[in-house]
Amino acid sequence: MVKIFTNPDSLNHFAAEKFIEIGIEAIEKCGKFTVALAGGSTPTSLYQLLTAEEFRSQIDWSKVFFFFGDERNVLPDREESNFRMAFENLFEPVQIAESQIFRWQTELENEYEIAADYQEKIKEFFDLKENEFPRFDLILLGIGDDGHTASLFPFTEALGETGKIAAANWVEKLQTHRLTFTFTTINNASNVMFLARGAAKAEVLREVLEGDSQPKKLPAQNVQLKNGSLLWLLDEKAAHNLQ
Ligand code: 6PG
């Protein structure tokens, strides 16, 4: 489902309410809320809003466990780190315990080790058997103007990686490896919420949501939940080219 908001504030407000609603339900049902955060700039203001009294007081944060749908191959204190963005805007203000945060261990030797380590951490946390995949209560995603989501970029190898939970992905245009959930992991979630704002996303959203199926060129098209709820939250500028 696609929901269009007149401005970023109303988009964030709705997203924060959904975050809390999904979280409370998960905690009531299973005693914990597992959420994978998106990186980039779009979700920053949502994370800040969650720390506002209005939302912060609505959930038992000690039962929320944070993961990252993707990460840059940089140390956690670097400007580009998705972990650092979440730490500064959400974890630190709400004082989330380190034991509740599962970040990609980018201090490890190389990107393949980082991905394998993260996969093991997830398997252990979700107590998964061989070939089982985690079912996150919520995965937040953004979308790039090239149609990538998480760090699943157009025509990259990880797009077709179905056997892994987490992968290292060489991105030619960035000349670097990125670290990312696979679509198998994303599509196994109970809830996925895309957040997209601004005119720069208008054309790619039209292609992804209303254009032909081109899953290699437009990776976000691969997000098709097996058994879950997919929500696209767009502001008017991002939704401008949609029919
Ligand atoms: C990342 C994100 C990435 C992001 C899009 C959109 O690590 O950068 O996970 O998938 O969501 O690139 O980024 P903006 O929100 O900055 O437009």
Image (spheres, helix red, strand yellow):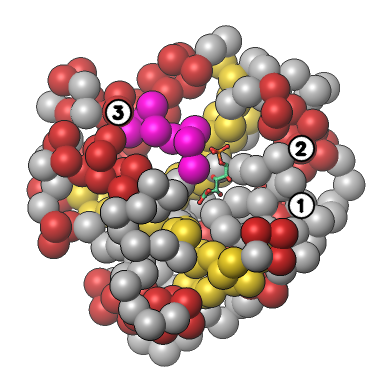
Residue under label 2: 204
**Amino acid under label 3?**
Gln
Quarter holding the C terminus is: top right
Question: Can residue 72 be seen?
Answer: yes
Q: How many residues crowd mark 1 within 10 Å: few (<14), some (14–19), many (20+)?
A: many
Q: Please give left or right for residue 168 compared with residue 61 in the image.
A: right
| 182 in relation to 205, above or below | below
Q: Secondary structure at mark 2?
A: helix
> What range is drawn magenta here?
40-47
Asked if the residue at tag 3 contacts the one at tag 2, i.e. Cβ–Cβ closer than 8 Å, the answer is no
Q: Secondary structure at mark 3?
A: helix
Q: How many residues crowd mark 3 within 10 Å: few (<14), some (14–19), many (20+)?
A: some
Query: What residue is shown at x 65% (from left), y 16% (from top)?
Result: 236
Indicate which disc, 1 or 3, sits on the residue closer to the N terminus.
3
Q: Closer to the camera, 149 or 35?
A: 149
**Amino acid under label 1?**
Leu
Residue under label 3: 48
Residue 48: where, in percent of width, then height? Answer: 30, 28
Residue under label 1: 218
Query: What residue is shown at x 46% (from left), y 65% (from top)?
Result: 73
Asked if the residue at tag 2 contacts the one at tag 1, i.e. Cβ–Cβ closer than 8 Å, the answer is yes
Indicate which disc, 2 or 3, sits on the residue closer to the N terminus.
3
Q: How many residues crowd mark 2 within 10 Å: few (<14), some (14–19), many (20+)?
A: many
| 241 in relation to 185, above or below | above
Query: What residue is shown at x 41% (from left), y 89% (from top)?
Result: 130
